Image (tube, grey):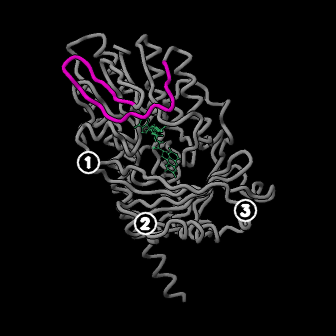
Amino acid sequence: MDADVIVVGAGPAGALCAYLLARAGATVLILEKALLPRYKPCGGGLTLRALRFLPFDPSPIVEVRAIGGQLAWEGRPLLQCRREPYVALMVMRDRFDAWLVEQAQKVGARLFTGALALRVEESKNFVQVETPSGILRAAYLVGADGVNSVVARHLGWRRRPTGVALEAELRVSARGLEQQGAYLTFDFGALPYGYGWIFPKTSHLSVGVFYAQEGRASDLKALLGHFLSHYPHVAGATIERVQGHRIPLGGEPQTLHTRRILLVGDAANLADAFLGEGISYALWSAHLAASVLFDCLANGQASLAMYTHAVQKTIGRELRHAARLARWVYAHPKHAAALLVGSAWLQTLWIDTLTARRSFTALLRVLPLYLPAILAQNLTRRQHRGTMG
Ligand SMILES: Cc1cc2nc3c(=O)[nH]c(=O)nc-3n(C[C@H](O)[C@H](O)[C@H](O)COP(=O)(O)OP(=O)(O)OC[C@H]3O[C@@H](n4cnc5c(N)ncnc54)[C@H](O)[C@@H]3O)c2cc1C
């Protein structure tokens, strides 16, 4: 046997799972197809939820501490907020992921880069992975290989609901950077069934569009250009990179284990269907996976079924609520924006949810109680405007 556990994929889910297992004394191998550090198209926004699941201080690789955010509609600000000490931390994924893997290596995990997992096979006593340079065996295997997971295919997953996002890194003038400040921009008028974002980094801006529906959006590049045309401070910016990637639309219950294999992060479809945020769920699932795997290594009678159960009770519930919210908001985005502008109470709820101070589950618990009053208020305001006009 080459290890107790083989982890396929060195993104946040795989790296943290490897760290937790190795720290607890397991022998761990990480197989990563890329050479690290590698670019990953991602806004690099670490929400407060993500930070709760990071066992170490990310300060060395943080680019910007975002102190607030603005919600906009086609460039027009709808509302702005500021929260102390910050609403999110901004990272570049090449540095963040490499740093996480280093933490795993420091506690004993072994990393093989340029190691593409081609096929997985499971037998009664072990699981094996075929790579171009040979076969590796372990007692258990973690599929952390992202949205196009080879390991998930072994579990019989042929199709999964996904959205798609396009990310660009923009080199803007010093004045452009200053105008963005340490604020995040979310523009829900940028495209139908999604939003556009502008996130500040140390010396550039990460911008992108997220299309929250299955299938391919017509022309994301054109949508990104149209979105950015509403923001004069990015006009004339040099585009350093544009890259698209699928994002899982979580929310459907799925089996995430076999006898010797389990799936974490994007490989397990654990990103939210409303914002496409997935790092926090990748880290959360890594904790749940490591805990169940450790039980299984210590006690032959324990079962990986505990993992699917734990995910469904926690992350799964949250993602189901995010998917419900996505269906409401993206079906009537203009209406949702108008309600938001008219209700200070709704604004607080919204900002707390975007910044992960409040869960989607908690939001949907209170929303139906107060929504009728907010709708009535909005109707009265419109009627009043009608009589005045
Ligand atoms: C444009 C865009 C913007 C986003 N912005 C945000 C954001 O701001 N905040 C947020 O929280 N989430 C964001 N997300 C979602 C987030 O990027 C993912 O949810 C997150 O990366 C999931 O982490 P993971 O470890 O599960 O998978 P990944 O980060 O995808 O890592 C998987 C790893 O597995 C490796 N791999 C794949 N196949 C194999 C194989 N066969 N063999 C070996 N290795 C393999 C890959 O090279 C990769 O390193 C964004 C996504 C996109 C596309």
At 41% from the left and 41% from the top, the residue drawn is 146
Location of mark 2 (residue) = 217
Q: Which mark is residue 237?
A: 3
Q: Are marks 1 and 3 in contact (CB under 8 Å)?
A: no
Write down the region rendered in magenta: 110-131
Marks 1, 2: nearer the viewer? 1
Which residue does the numbered mark 1 point to in the structure image? 158
Q: Earlier in the sequence, mark 1 or mark 3?
A: 1
Where does residue 31 sit, x and y in percent of width and height? 44, 28
Residue with the most extreme right position: 174
The yes-or-no answer for disc 1 within 8 Å of ligand 1 is: no
Q: Is residue 117 magenta?
A: yes
Quarter of the image for the N terminus: give it.
top left
Q: Which is nearer the N-term, disc 3 or disc 2? A: 2
Instruction: Mark 1 or mark 2: name the one nearer the start of the chain.
Output: 1
Residue 131 seen in this snapshot? yes
Q: Quadrant of the C terminus?
A: bottom right
Residue 6, quarter of picture: top left
Q: Where is residue 124, by image quadrant?
A: top left
Q: Nearer the viewer, residue 242 or 18?
A: 242
Label 2 secondary element: loop
Residue at x-position 63% and y-position 53%? 206
Q: Is residue 155 left or right of residue 380?
A: left
Image position of 139 (left or right of 357): left
Alpha-carbon distance for marks 1 and 3? 40 Å
Which marked residue is nearer to the observer: mark 1 or mark 3?
1
Q: Secondary structure at mark 3?
A: loop
Q: Let me know if residue 121 is in the magenta part.
A: yes
- Camera-side residue: 67 or 6? 6
Seen at 25% across and 41% down, the residue is 254
